[in-house]
Each structure stands twice: as structure tokens, then as C-alpha cells.
Image (cartoon, rainbow, N blue to C red):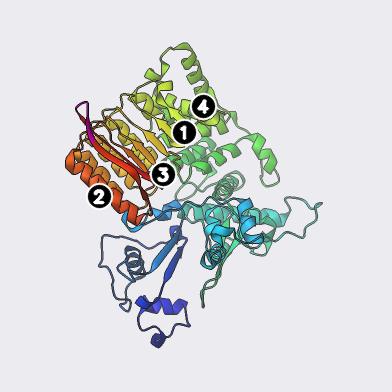
């Protein structure tokens, strides 16, 4: 570590720094999602000596765990995929950056607002990927010298767009969102010529110390990279007869157009993290003649094959009918049908809801996905989800998990839910990066300790945003209380402020354990413990409520 520090900071002299313990040191790990090291926190020994030589992954792991330079502070800037690499017990606080263009202009043009005027914060805003993480442009915004009368798709622009598309596709396959100058050169991109496309592509200058001053490049938003990747794949298939989705790539003679789109559907479904979902929707949208006409100067032919369209739609419907357990993937397939202007499944669900009194009880997985699609695409306010407005049923609840995920408050009390609902909540909502859920009321459902243990696993997740969890009357014993306490103990960054365990059976040990954890949370997470935590006997049941207040 000492050698590494001196490599970055050439001004450091061995005699001037006899011991690092006397200094306040802060490390900023910027763009952890780009890290290719295997950060296995279980294997290998932990370093404690700063002069001991080790591989980069061991150094990083020891620094994050706090065994190396334990008094140092770490600030990690990353997209969610990078955060997932670090166990929650090594993270004290998580802040989600949701920057806007207006906010960016305030930061860069008018100076930092009061809460960001600290010199370290101001410097980090300029030097790190904070603005990039918020999906806004940062860096040079040059404009083209071309006149307005120039053709939009002249030869230079065509070549640049195709090169950007190639870069977008190849790096999307690698999972890269940030590119080096070498990556651009390999794709035939002239950096100076891309200035005309500053609205799509931008330079990110990292003004590091010493010899490490590099320029990186990225698309201004992930969706732009996904669209250009889809365009490039479509362009190569349309103009050259190459199918880039096959390994090795095949030619059009070997594959029909409908098979080409089926390959794309399969690629998206095979992706565990949904990395290709939006790519698929863009690609299917490009298959329509109305969209191709906008790009006619880039394509050799523009046509809409009704047979191909129908075969693709039927294939997607077939996948939906397979009752895929991943509700997000099912939902994306409905978005795909929408891109192809097919609303038949949605119309069937609407008709069924109007004709049958309790249609929800007999819905298949595909019909639940259709209903979810209708709700998410409508103007209905989904901030509060109340299951009782639909049907108090576990099957109904599990079918509507995507709606639960976009809601801020979910009211599920007295809804006949069980451990199975806790499984769905944990896997689809509590551990999801896209979940909005803040308040969760599960009171008076027979969740038992087994269900509460599953919820506790969700509370351990750094993605969990739940601030209020109500488990009143859920038949929780000291076993469930210990699981909740363990979850809070392992995740000091947990946003949980209120936990209602009234009308349960925690016993003395369960209540004491939760009380102890609450006190620890108060000290370590800057949380003020509320004015009341009471244990009493009421109607034969022990009652415990605890509230954490910021």
C-alpha cells in the first residue's frame, strides 16, 4: 500500500511520513462498478502492515474491511452493480445520488450550495464521477462548426454513428459503461469528430495526482448506449446480413429475420440482471417500417414484413405463457409487445376484469403481468398500494409485486399472507435497486418466524429503503426477533426508523436483544433513539413497539 500511495503521490517522502496513523487519510474509490478485481472478502488473509506487498485485490479488500489503515476514511462512488461487491457489514452509510441538470448547472456555474461548500466536497464534485453517476454530462461540450444546411447524414456522420454503435454494443457485452481512448480507437472512432455528438457522448476528465491523469469517455445516459447498440446490431443485420447475436456470428442466409429477433428475446431473458431488456425493446422498435423511415439514409432497405412481425409476437407470447417466475422479465415482454403495436393480451385482461366478478382469483402469471403493465402505463397514482382494493389473497399479492415495488407505501395488513409472500417481497422488492418502498405494513398476517427471517434477509440488503416496518400480530417469537436484530446489526446503514412488533411473543431475550441493537444504531449511525420503547402485557399478548427517529 505504501508503494502504491507513493506511485500516485510522488511528493510523499519516506522520512516525512514515519507513520500514517498520525495523519487523517481519506481514500476515494471512484467508479467501483468498473473494478475487474475479484473482491472475495472470505478468502485470503487480511493485511495489517502498510509496507507488506500484496496484489491489488487484497489491498482493496483489506482497506475496505478496515484491517489496513483502520483510521482512514473511505468514500466509494459507484453504480449499484459496484456496491453489490461489498458486504453490508463493511459499509456505514449509503447515499443515493439523484442529480439533475439544473442542479449540475448550479454546482458548476454558480458555485456549490451551502451543504456542499466544504473544500473536500467541492473538489470531489469536480474530480470524481458523482455527476456521471447521476446520469448527466460532465466535461467538454464542444459544438460542431457545421452549418444548419448540411445534410444530417453525411458520410462523416454515418461513419461516426456506426462506430459509436459498435462501441456501444461491444462494451455493453462486457458490462462496461466507461471507455478508454484505446477502446475508441479499436472501434474506429476519431475523438475530435465525435464533438458533433456531444449530446450523446462525452469526455470525463479525471484530474488525478502525479502521473495518473486520464481521459475517459461515456455515453451521457445508459439508455443511449443501449439504443446505439441495438441500432448497430440492426444495421449489421439489415445492411450486411450479419447476426451479431450469434456466437460465432452467422449470415442472413443461415437465419431468418424472425429467428434473428427470437435470438434477441432469448438473450434478454437469459440475462440475470436485465442488462439487455431495453436493448431488446429498442431493437424490436427498429423492426417497424415507421421507425426505419427516420433512419432511411443509414439503411440499405426499409421494409415491414408482416409475417416476421407476427412470428416475433407469437414467440414473445409463448414466452409469457411459460409463466416465467421473474415478474420484471415478464413485464419487459409486455413492453416488447407494445413496441410491436400488439395489445391483444392487455385487451384480454381488461375484458376478463369487466366480465368476471372475482377475475383476480383466476389470473395466470401472464395475466398478472398484463395487469401490472396496464397499471404502470396508466395515469393512476401508485404511491400507495392497498391490496384490499383488489383482493385479500396471497396469489393476488404475488402477482402484483411489480406494483408493490414502485409504490412508496404498501398496506398489506389482514390480507391472509404467509411465508411465501415474504419470499417474494425479499427477492423482488427489498433487495431491488429500483424499489421505491419506504413504508411496509404486514400487520396481522401469519408470517411466523420463518417469514420474518426472510424479511430480515431483505433488511440486510444495501438496496433496502424501508424506513417503517409493521409486523404487529404476525406470531413472531424471540427467534424472529433475533433474526431482525441480526439484520440491523449487520447493516449499520439500514434506513429503518420504525419497527412495530406489538402483539407478538418476543420474550425477554428477544426484546432485550432488539433494545441493545437499537442503542448501537443510535451511536454508530447517528440515529436518535425515540422517547419510547415499551414492554407490557395486554390481552394476554406481549406488546413491543420500537421507534427510531432521526
Q: Which residue is mark 1?
A: 331
Q: CA distance from mark 4 to mark 2?
A: 46 Å
Tell which circle, 3 or 1, labels the residue nearer the N-terminal end. 1
Q: Which residue is mark 3?
A: 465
Whether residue 303 is visible to the viewer of this picture, yes or no, is no
Furthest residue in direction bottom, as rendered: 15
Q: CA distance from mark 4 to mark 1?
A: 10 Å
Looking at the rendered structure, which numbered label has been put on residue 354?
none
Count neighbours of disc 3 (C-alpha within 10 A) and say few if under 14, some if 14 to 19, many if 20 or more. Answer: many
Residue 233, percent across and down? 55, 47
Start and end of the magenta stretch?
536-540
The one nearer the camera, 336 or 454, is 454
Residue 102 relative to residue 545: left or right: right
The nearer-to-camera label among 4 and 3 is 3
Residue 343 relative to residue 62: left or right: right
Q: Which residue is mark 4?
A: 374
Under circle 1, the secondary element is helix
Q: Is residue 128 above or below residue 342?
A: below
Q: Is residue 154 above or below residue 473?
A: below
Residue 231, percent across and down? 59, 46
Tell which circle, 4 or 1, labels the residue nearer the N-terminal end. 1
**Which residue corresponds to the image point at 62% horizontal and 33% vertical from the top-left?**
304
Residue 543, percent across and down? 25, 34
Looking at the rendered structure, which numbered label has been put on residue 516?
2
Determine the main secondary structure of the stretch shown in magenta. Answer: strand
The nearer-to-camera label among 3 and 1 is 3
Amino acid at each position: 500500500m505504501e508503494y502504491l500511495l507513493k506511485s500516485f503521490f510522488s511528493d510523499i517522502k519516506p522520512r516525512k511520513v514515519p507513520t500514517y496513523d498520525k495523519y487523517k487519510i481519506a481514500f476515494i474509490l471512484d467508479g467501483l462498478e468498473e473494478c475487474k478485481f475479484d473482491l472475495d472478502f472470505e478468502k485470503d488473509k487480511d493485511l495489517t502492515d502498510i509496507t507488506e506487498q500484496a496484489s491489488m485485490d487484497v489491498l482493496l479488500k483489506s482497506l475496505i474491511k478496515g484491517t489496513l489503515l483502520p483510521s482512514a476514511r473511505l468514500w466509494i462512488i459507484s453504480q449499484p452493480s459496484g456496491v453489490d461487491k461489498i458486504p453490508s457489514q463493511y459499509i456505514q452509510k449509503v447515499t443515493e445520488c439523484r442529480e439533475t441538470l439544473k442542479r449540475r448547472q448550479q454546482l458548476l456555474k454558480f458555485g456549490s450550495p451551502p451543504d456542499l461548500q466544504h473544500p473536500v466536497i467541492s473538489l470531489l464534485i469536480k474530480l470524481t464521477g458523482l455527476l456521471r453517476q447521476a446520469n448527466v454530462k460532465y466535461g467538454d461540450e464542444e459544438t460542431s462548426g457545421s452549418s444548419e444546411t448540411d445534410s444530417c447524414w453525411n458520410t462523416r456522420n454515418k461513419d461516426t454513428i456506426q462506430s459509436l454503435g459498435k462501441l456501444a454494443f461491444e462494451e455493453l457485452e462486457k458490462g462496461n459503461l466507461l471507455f478508454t481512448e484505446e477502446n475508441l480507437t479499436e472501434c474506429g472512432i476519431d475523438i475530435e469528430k465525435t464533438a458533433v455528438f456531444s449530446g450523446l457522448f462525452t469526455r470525463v476528465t479525471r484530474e488525478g495526482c502525479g502521473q495518473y491523469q486520464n481521459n475517459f469517455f461515456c455515453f451521457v445516459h445508459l439508455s443511449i448506449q443501449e439504443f446505439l447498440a441495438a441500432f448497430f446490431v440492426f444495421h449489421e443485420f439489415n445492411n450486411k446480413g450479419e447476426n451479431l447475436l450469434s456466437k460465432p456470428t452467422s449470415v442472413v442466409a443461415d437465419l431468418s429475420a424472425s429467428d434473428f429477433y427470437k435470438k434477441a428475446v432469448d438473450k434478454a431473458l437469459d440475462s440475470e440482471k436485465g442488462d439487455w431488456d431495453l436493448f431488446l425493446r429498442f431493437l424490436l422498435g427498429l423492426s417497424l417500417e415507421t421507425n426505419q423511415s427516420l433512419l432511411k439514409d443509414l439503411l440499405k432497405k426499409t421494409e415491414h414484413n408482416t409475417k416476421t412481425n407476427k412470428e416475433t409476437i407469437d414467440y414473445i407470447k409463448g414466452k409469457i405463457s411459460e409463466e416465467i417466475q421473474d415478474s420484471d422479465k415478464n413485464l419487459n415482454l409486455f413492453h416488447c409487445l407494445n413496441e410491436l403495436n400488439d395489445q391483444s393480451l392487455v385487451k384480454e385482461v381488461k375484458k376478463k376484469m369487466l366480465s368476471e366478478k372475482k377475475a383476480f382469483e383466476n389470473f395466470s402469471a401472464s395475466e398478472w403481468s398484463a395487469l401490472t403493465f396496464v397499471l404502470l402505463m396508466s395515469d393512476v397514482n401508485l404511491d400507495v398500494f392497498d391490496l384490499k382494493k383488489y383482493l385479500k389473497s396471497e396469489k393476488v399479492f404475488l402477482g402484483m409485486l411489480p406494483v408493490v415495488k414502485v409504490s412508496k407505501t404498501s398496506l398489506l395488513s389482514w390480507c391472509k399472507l404467509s411465508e411465501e409472500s415474504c419470499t417474494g417481497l425479499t427477492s423482488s422488492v427489498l433487495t431491488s435497486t429500483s424499489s421505491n418502498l419506504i413504508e411496509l405494513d404486514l400487520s396481522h398476517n401469519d408470517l411466523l418466524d420463518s417469514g420474518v427471517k426472510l424479511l430480515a434477509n431483505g433488511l440486510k440488503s444495501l438496496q433496502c429503503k424501508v424506513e417503517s416496518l409493521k409486523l404487529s400480530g404476525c406470531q413472531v417469537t424471540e427467534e424472529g426477533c433475533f433474526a431482525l436484530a441480526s439484520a440491523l446489526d449487520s447493516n449499520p446503514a439500514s434506513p429503518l426508523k420504525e419497527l412495530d412488533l406489538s402483539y407478538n411473543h418476543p420474550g425477554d431475550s428477544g426484546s432485550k436483544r432488539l433494545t441493545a441493537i437499537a442503542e448501537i444504531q443510535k451511536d454508530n449511525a447517528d440515529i436518535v433513539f425515540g422517547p419510547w420503547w415499551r414492554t407490557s402485557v395486554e390481552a394476554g399478548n406481549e406488546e413491543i413497539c420500537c421507534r427510531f427517529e432521526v
